[in-house]
Image (cartoon, rainbow, N blue to C red):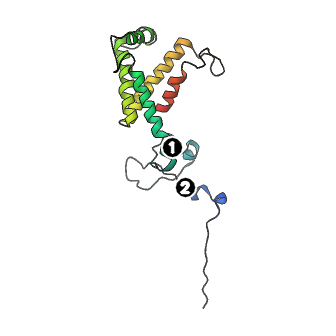
């Protein structure tokens, strides 16, 4: 009797199909339950990438390196923005707060119901306490939603007050488009 043994080897990485990748993507499980297996990568996943608009469950290696410092520093900068005119938000009697009401809220957000002082205080509270939550990682999604709405309002204000300043090829005197900073913040909060 003769026995034959067959050994199979995996094809080289250059000829290996995507489905046999040695580094499978981890997608978030279905939040409704029932599906305990990991989802397979779809065409939409390949187009948008493994992290865009999805919860990433693989925090090992390089995945966590840029995200945590970005979240913490962005939150700290928002705390600074929300405490204009003092240590805490909505310092009602300071010249900085009254200037924000007079030169930003009253002329550009007069369509909002209620007092301009109320909306200026809401703006400060969202930036201050939302920044704290965002930096600490507490209630991150609600905080980022509120901060996103605040930054969209800031982009609206800057575009309404000075226009697009020749964007994208215009050269402005201060070397920065006024809406750049809130737009970048809005993209981080998105």
The front one of 20 and 130 is: 130
Q: Is residue 22 visible?
A: yes
Of pointers 2 and 1, the one earlier in the residue sequence = 2
The front one of 134 and 151 is: 134
Horizontal relation, residue 146 to residue 22: left or right:
left
Element at label 1: loop
Give the Cα distance between marks 2 and 1. Answer: 15 Å
Residue 90, above or below 74: above
Residue at 54 percent across and 18 percent down: it is 178
Residue at 66 percent across and 21 percent down: it is 169
Q: Quadrant of residue 125?
A: top left
Coordinates of residue 190 in the picture (x, y in percent)? 48, 32
The quarter of the picture where the N terminus appears is bottom right
Coordinates of residue 11 in the picture (x, y in percent)? 64, 64
Residue at 47 percent across and 44 percent down: it is 64
Residue under label 1, please give it.
Answer: 51
The front one of 30 and 171 is: 171
Local packing at callout 2 (Cα closer than 10 Å; few below 14, some 14-19, many 20+) is: few
Q: How many marks?
A: 2
Q: Which mark is residue 23?
A: 2
Horizontal relation, residue 90 to residue 188: left or right:
left
Q: Which mark is residue 92?
A: none
């Amino acid at each position: 009797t003769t026995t034959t043994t067959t050994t199979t080897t995996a094809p080289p990485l250059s000829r290996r199909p995507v489905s046999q990748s040695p580094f499978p993507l981890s997608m978030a499980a279905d939040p409704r339950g029932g599906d305990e297996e990991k989802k397979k990568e779809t065409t939409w996943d390949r187009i948008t990438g493994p992290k865009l608009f999805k919860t990433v469950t693989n925090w090992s290696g390089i995945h966590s390196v840029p995200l945590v410092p970005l979240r913490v520093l962005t939150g700290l900068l928002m705390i600074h923005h929300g405490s204009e005119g003092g240590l805490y938000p909505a310092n009602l009697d300071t010249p900085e707060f009254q200037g924000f009401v007079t030169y930003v809220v009253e002329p550009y957000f007069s369509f909002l119901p209620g007092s301009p002082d109320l909306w200026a205080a809401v703006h400060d509270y969202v930036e201050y306490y939302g920044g704290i939550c965002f930096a600490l990682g507490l209630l991150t999604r609600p905080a980022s939603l509120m901060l996103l709405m605040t930054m969209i309002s800031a982009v609206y204000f800057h575009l309404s007050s000075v226009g697009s300043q020749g964007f994208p090829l215009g050269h402005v005197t201060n070397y920065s488009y006024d809406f750049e900073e809130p737009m970048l913040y809005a993209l981080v909060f998105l």
